[in-house]
Amino acid sequence: MASSKPTEIGSSKMFEGFNKRYKHHSSTLGCSMNFHIYFPPSTSPDQRFPVLYWLSGLTCNDENFIIKSGAQRVASTEGIALIVPDTSPRGLNVEGEADSYDFGVGAGFYLNATVEKWKNWQMYDYIVKELPKVLSDNFPQLDTSRASISGHSMGGHGALTICLKKLDKYKSVSAFAPIVNPINCPWGQKAFTNYLGDDKTAWEEYDATSLIKKFNDVGATIMIDQGDDDKFLHENQLLPSKFDEACRNVKAPLLLRMQPDLLLTNPRRVVRLDQVRRMNLFVHGRAGGHSTQKRSEKLWTTDENNTDPHKREQHTCTEEALQALKKKKKS
């Protein structure tokens, strides 16, 4: 059995900082788990870094984002540590755990399963409780009290739902092509039925569009980037317009940017952050602070008052905006 204390199993230098990979035994999940930390360059021995948790999408593990995103460049400049966990328990050999890409191994959906067969799939508790304690107990250079959270696709779903239920724990939340209304999309319905059973009130506890109706005292603006050429957007797996509508109904601050001609979701491919032109860490600022909040509030105000149709379609995801984007692509 792997030790509960993390053991370093890999290291590489990048943008004057270090990617380090660790293994530990998770008592929450009942198996060995890996996670990555990117440590930005330090200016003094006593420096403590705020943290940004990155939750990856379907089929990913703790390596995809670290290897492919290039986000370390911005994290190095901003002095932010990146924390990248795995997406599910592994090595438990539960029957059917690897039968499909969208359920089981690599598809933990960041929830606490209640169906007995999947009792080890407790990714919500792992991300919210166990992993932060492992970090604070073993890495004094990390300031886990200054934390933000982000993710892609399934990981964007995880980031949003976790933050909304723990608004006092995270300074801000952002996501790329997140699954924001899983109770109404095929991916979510499959996962929730198997992990949580048929009680749909239990499903709502892991659905961002449902949660924003209850937990909407959001300090910093929620940021979402969504590519308009994403086939899963048009297959109704992501449903950003549902989340946008729910936020508007409760006046929750949301900056939802439609990125023209971009594909930001593919379950077999990591998000291409370079295509978005920049990593949206400015929302997190150094994972908190008044200047960051003021900037995000300004962006929200600008979005609401924007009368330029070309610019507004990049900031909202109403049905009208989606139709306008489709027409523009055809012309």
Image (cartoon, rainbow, N blue to C red):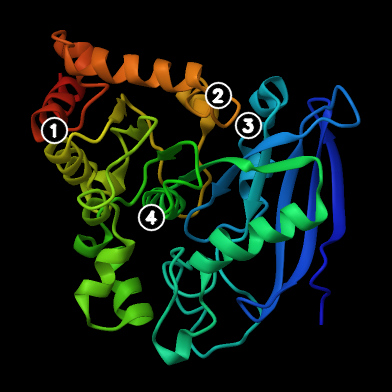
How busy is the neighbourhood of tag 1: few (under 14 within 10 Å), some, or many (20 plus)? some
Is tag 2's residue or tag 3's residue first in the polypeptide sequence? 3
Quarter of the view holding residue 254? top left
Is tag 3's residue or tag 4's residue first in the polypeptide sequence? 3
Residue, far top: 308
Q: Residue at x 23, y 53 (%)?
A: 214
Amino acid tagged 4: Lys
Residue where numbered disc 4 is placed: 165
* 79 sits left or right of 284 in the view: right
* 92 sits left or right of 282 in the view: right
Q: Residue at x 51, y 76 (%)?
A: 121
> Which is more foreground, mark 2 or mark 1?
2
Quarter of the view holding residue 331? top left
Residue where numbered disc 1 is placed: 318
Marks 4 and 2 close (CB-CB < 8 Å): no
Gap in Å between the C-alphas at discs 3 and 4?
26 Å
Asked if 142 appears above or below 314 in the picture, the reply is below
What number is the disc on residue 71? 3
How busy is the neighbourhood of tag 3: few (under 14 within 10 Å), some, or many (20 plus)? many
Amino acid tagged 1: Thr
Marks 2 and 1 close (CB-CB < 8 Å): no
Gap in Å between the C-alphas at discs 4 and 2?
22 Å
Q: Give how far across and how far down residue 321 sits, in percent.
A: 14, 27
Amino acid tagged 3: Ala
Is tag 3's residue or tag 1's residue first in the polypeptide sequence? 3
Is tag 4's residue or tag 1's residue first in the polypeptide sequence? 4
Gap in Å between the C-alphas at discs 2 and 1?
28 Å
Helix, strand or loop under label 4 = helix
Q: Nearer the viewer, residue 310 or 47?
A: 47
> Which is more foreground, mark 2 or mark 3?
2
Marks 3 and 4 close (CB-CB < 8 Å): no
